[in-house]
Every structure is written in structure tokens, then in C-alpha cells.
Image: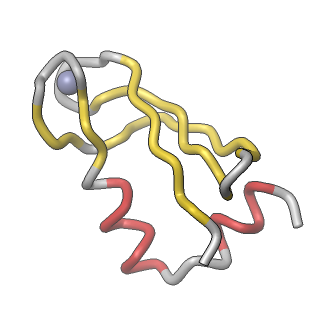
């Protein structure tokens, strides 16, 4: 399964929770990831995008269940 399909196989509510719970090193706070792409990762998939608040690059691994 490709990374994008894996992401879309996650229920919508969980996906939005994950997107709203990304740590931003610039804000030093929890942020929402924006304009992200999904790539394969060793442990599952990786969301790579920008902090919605400040635009700093953020990433989050979503581990395979
Ligand atoms: Zn930020």
C-alpha cells in the first residue's frame, strides 16, 4: 500500500486529530500541520508539512497500527 492510501485508510476523525497534534519546534507548542505531503517511513508513514501558525517545517510519524 502506498503512503497516501495508508493515510486515507485512517478514519477521518483520527486523521484530523493527528493533523492538529504536531509539535512545532519554532512555536515550541502543539500545532496544526498544513500543506503536507505523505511519504513512506520505516515505522509507517510520515507527514511532512508546515506549521499552520508560523510556517516552520514540521513532520509527524504515524506508526502502523
Ligand atoms: Zn510553528
Image quadrant of residue 50?
top left
Residue 63 horizontal/vertical position (percent): 57, 62
Residue at horizontal 11%, vertical 26%? Answer: 28
**Quadrant location, the N terminus:** bottom right
Residue at horizontal 85%, vertical 58%? Answer: 2
Residue at horizontal 36%, vertical 54%? Answer: 19
Left of 58 or right of it: where is 44? right
Left of 22 or right of it: where is 29? left
Image quadrant of residue 59?
top left
Residue 55 horizontal/vertical position (percent): 30, 18
Q: Quadrant of ligand 1?
A: top left
> In front here: 58 or 35?
58
> In front here: 60 or 14?
60
Residue 6 horizontal/vertical position (percent): 72, 67
Residue farthest right in this picture = 1
Question: Colour scheme of this structure image?
Answer: secondary structure
**Quadrant location, the C terminus:** bottom right
Q: Tally the numbered discs.
A: 0
Left of 39 or right of it: where is 25? left
Q: Is residue 37 above or below residue 17?
A: above
Residue at horizontal 30%, vertical 29%? Answer: 51
Left of 14 or right of it: where is 39? right
Residue 53 horizontal/vertical position (percent): 17, 28
Amino acid at each position: 500500500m502506498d503512503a497516501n492510501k495508508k493515510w486515507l485508510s485512517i478514519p477521518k476523525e483520527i486523521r484530523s486529530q493527528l493533523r492538529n497534534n504536531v509539535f512545532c519546534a519554532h512555536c515550541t507548542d502543539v500545532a496544526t500541520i498544513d500543506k503536507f505531503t505523505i511519504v513512506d517511513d520505516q515505522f509507517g508513514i510520515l507527514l511532512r508539512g508546515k506549521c499552520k501558525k508560523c510556517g516552520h517545517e514540521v513532520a509527524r510519524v504515524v506508526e502502523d497500527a
